[in-house]
Image: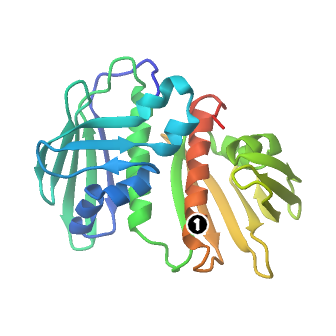
Amino acid sequence: MAKKKSKSPEPIVESLAIAVSPTRAWEALTSPRILGDVVMGHVEIDPKPGKPFIWQWGVWKKSAPRADEDAYTWRGQVLDAVPGSTLVLGGAGQSLAVLTVKGEGEAALVTVVQADVPRGYDFEGYRRGWADFLLKLKTLLERPPYQNEVFLRTLVNASPAQVIAAWLSASTLSKLLPGKVKLQAKPGGAYEWQRKDRPGAKETGRFLEISKGRRVSFTWGAGAKPREVRISAEKTPYGALVSLEQIGTSSGFHEADRRMWAHLLERLQVYFYYGKKIGA
């Protein structure tokens, strides 16, 4: 997390119930592939005491100001592990974090306790970061009801109105996507995105619904049956809880679309966390 003045020396404690078995939750917490999907970056972990680990928040590392690049790579050792129950991560000069899993049947409670926040770092940023980590883990493990539906959630350090306004601003979207965006922010209004990540590629569609400060929906993708994307935001103690749902997705588009939207939501987080600044 970025270096900002810590507001409290107290431990951070965040818990979230996930509708999967404790065994499945533990497997996710110790899987480099699943953790890498949650943090949108590179993870190395072997849940055995004494083994090194690396967690790297890939989108944040690339999009945050250069001075903070190293803040998004967490290295250390597995200090202790009780298979199926407890994972203790830390090491010399690193914060100590304890991840636990409890539950039975198809209900697991995952808890993160961070013993301390490094001096000079942002306490609230770390707290929001762990809450966001658990929310993304829950969303990933609790699959949406329809096989090819895309469903993502994240916490953004902004108000719901600011989040929705960002999706209706051509200048803001040009930074987030990135690329060049033109749009008419009204129901039925058209948008056009000249993609910077794929030179020559262009996305077009129309806004279907705009509820000021609450949600926006629009068509996505060419063809006779374009997908529909719905973005909503609601207020929480951590900022805005942003949900993105894409429906009408064929199996050929599902994973590529899911990763693209997840990437853009991470950039949305960076944009607001750093005061509407973001790296290309």
Q: Is residue 167 left or right of residue 43?
A: right
List x then y, in percent, for residue 26: 23, 60
Quarter of the image containing the C terminus?
top right
Q: How many marks?
A: 1
Q: Residues within 10 Å of mark 1 (few under 14, many from 20)?
A: few
Image-based side of 175 in relation to 266, left or right: right
Q: Residue at x 76, y 64 (%)?
A: 218
Judging depth in this view, the residue of 280 and 135 nearest the camera is 280
The image position of residue 57, as x and y in percent, is 44, 43
Determine whether, in the image, residue 60 is placed left or right of residue 260. Answer: left
State the residue in front, 79 or 247: 79
Indicate the quadrant where residue 169 lies: top right
Residue 124, given in percent of the width and then of the height, sits at 43, 30
Q: Is the residue 16 above or below the residue 67 in the image?
A: below
- Look at the picture and state if 1 lies above or below 242: above
What is the x, y in percent for residue 231? 65, 58
Q: Secondary structure at mark 1?
A: helix
Q: Is residue 141 left or right of residue 198?
A: left
Res 243 visible: no
For the point 51% across and 51% down, the residue is 154
